[in-house]
Amino acid sequence: MTAEEIYLNITCWLFAQNKPCQDYFGFARYRHGVLKSPIGVLISDDLYDESLESAPLARVRSVVEQSVGRPLDETEWALVSELQFIHNMWPPEVWPALCRYTRERYLKSWNGLPVGSTPAASSPS
């Protein structure tokens, strides 16, 4: 899974879900029922268990990396962490703008194009 695919998997899930993944007391969780946080999206069903909710971050990262099939570099982990922060701290109505800003900060290109460009603007004249 590429960094772009990680971003798309997380944001597509979050925008469709349109609500934070929280328990009955309002505490953020990786998973709760059918809801998932950005990190919860990346954890495969067969590797998720309730103990991850209180596990050290190093263990959570290890499970995420097993789920995506490879180690994440520091920039990719920072992208995932920032998306998790957006989910935990901001209401869903501002997620698209914040996620777009995050994408522009962490992903230098998008489908081979510089972030913010369009195919027409990037094609030679």
Image: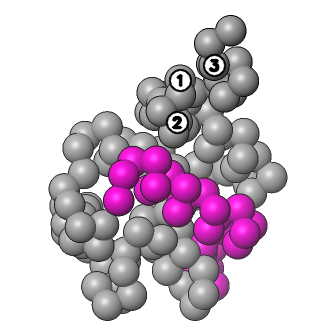
- Residue 29, given in percent of the width and then of the height, sits at 49, 74
From this view, report whether residue 89 is shown above or below residue 15: above
- Counting residues from the start of the chain, the first of labels 3 and 2 encountered is 2
Callout 2: SS: strand
Label 2 belongs to which residue?
Answer: 110
Q: How crowded is the residue under tag 3: few (<14 C-alpha within 10 Å), some, or many (20+)?
A: few
Q: Is residue 42 visible?
A: yes
Label 1 belongs to which residue?
Answer: 114
Q: Amino acid at mark 3?
A: Ser
Callout 3: SS: loop
Q: Which residue in the rendered view is the most extreme toward the right?
A: 93
Dot 3 and dot 2 residues touching (CB under 8 Å): no
| 26 magenta-colored | yes
Dot 2 and dot 1 residues touching (CB under 8 Å): yes
Q: Nearer the viewer, residue 16 or 61?
A: 16
Mark 3 vs mark 2, foreground winner is 3
What segment is highlighted magenta in the picture? 1-29
The residue sitting at 52% across, 36% down in the picture is 110
Report which quarter residue 44 is drawn in. Answer: bottom left
From this view, report whether residue 111 is shown above or below residue 114: below
Label 3 belongs to which residue?
Answer: 123
Report which quarter residue 66 is drawn in. Answer: bottom left
The residue sitting at 48% across, 71% down in the picture is 41
- Residue 63, given in percent of the width and then of the height, sits at 24, 72
Q: Is residue 64 visible?
A: no
- Counting residues from the start of the chain, the first of labels 3 and 1 encountered is 1
Give the CA distance from mark 2 to mark 1.
Answer: 6 Å
Q: Amino acid at mark 1?
A: Pro
